[in-house]
Amino acid sequence: MPAEVVRQVLTAIRSALATGAVPGAIVGVLRDGAVDIQAVGSTATDGATALSPQSLVRISSNTKPIAAALALALRDDGLLDLDDPVDRFIPELAKRRVLRRLDGSPDDTVPALSQITIADLLTMRLGFGFVFEAPCPTVDLAGDAGLGIGPPDPAVPLTPDEWIARFAELPLLEQPGSVWRYDLAYAVLGVVLNRAAAQPLDSLLRDRITRPLGMVDTDFVARPGSLPDCYSTTESGLAVFDPPDGRWTTPPSFPDARGGLVSTAADLLRFAQALFDGGQDVLSERSVTEMTTDQLTAEQRSAPSAQAFLDGAGWGYGVQVIAPDHGTGSRLARYGWGGGLGTLWYSWPDYRTAVVVLTQVLPPSAELVESSINAVEQTLLTE
């Protein structure tokens, strides 16, 4: 039953709560169609208000799986194909140039050898994203242009057309399709979906994914006062990153498919259930299978950019895909992803079990993430 998994996860994360690493956490478990959601701790470090199992949270990169599902739904509808070049919808990105060297001048480029495809966006093989392995002046320019190199920020004043126009002024870091690199591909994907359906991304997502699945609280904007405080970790402790009436309470100019959504544990488990059920009424079984199957080559999984985030695991469409034989330490197959503001979702399909652990601390507590996953797997293996 889901209650036993919840109990084990809550026990495992108790130390993170006791030390103040997070002020509160929501744990939700879906198992064989039954759901249990519990919350511990408070909405803020002052401890004045208890965190509710129904609390709305900023899910940051847990937006990506939902955006990927939307892309696949539009493919199922015939509005696009995964092999389509992105410049079919975004002509601004035709005839891309590519850096000769990752750490080189933005003006030292060569022509792209292939077009960017929609599949490249879903698998984050756009050829642009976060760089940890070397200094990169081109990424610095992207930050200066307000393209969002860092934590999600829905207060960015750019419209989708303005955002893509600024991105189009930059060269790619690598050849399209060659390297998995986090996370700007999903910002570009959001613009593709907007244009492919001729509909704003926020209303398109509601019409095609969240409303049909009953994800009534998942959106790009929150009701004022409905969010808990969100914190960043500093040397002196937790500092407020975004207050309850902060940046997520105003409709964004650029609904960002990278990390702009707010949601609840119940809604995320509804999404997980839809994948278990072969897509329900929003996705085909083919799309669910593709989404949850590793799409990377061994070389792409082992690249420095992938190692920084995936640690040897694979990537499907919007989700990390982990097999026990990938050397990741996982004893069971699972798929899912986490968000940089402290959210986590994984599904163990062989056990029809999905788990969400929701906090609001940037970066996520590594101890909390690891202990949560270990607790789930130990519970499943010993039953």
Image: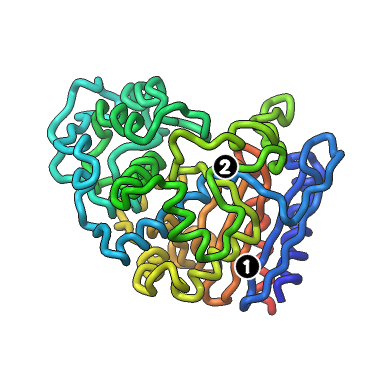
Rendered position, 277 above or below 342: below
Q: Secondary structure at mark 1?
A: helix
Residue 13 pos. (x, y %)? 74, 53
**Category of crowding for the residue at label 2, using alpha-carbon neighbours closer than 10 angstroms: few (below 14), some (14–19), many (at least 20):** many
Amino acid type assigned to the residue bearing label 2 in the image: Val
Can residue 48 be seen here? yes
User: Residue placed at 25% from the left, 20% from the top?
Assistant: 105
What colouring style does the render use?
rainbow
Near-viewer residue (197 or 186): 197
Disc 1 from disc 2: Cα separation? 34 Å
Residue 245 pos. (x, y %)? 68, 33
Amino acid type assigned to the residue bearing label 1 in the image: Glu
- Would you name the residue on which mark 1 appears? 377
**Label 1 or label 2, whichever comes before in sequence order:** 2
User: Residue placed at 59% from the left, 32% from the top?
Assistant: 247
Where on the picture, by quarter, is residue 182?
top left
- Would you name the residue on which mark 2 appears? 221
Near-viewer residue (96 or 274): 274
Can residue 233 be seen here? no
Task: State which quarter of the image contains the C terminus.
Answer: bottom right
User: Residue placed at 65% from the left, 66% from the top?
Assistant: 376
Q: Locate residue 352 relative to residue 88 in the image: left or right.
A: right
Task: State which quarter of the image contains the N terminus.
Answer: bottom right
Residue 314 pos. (x, y %)? 40, 58
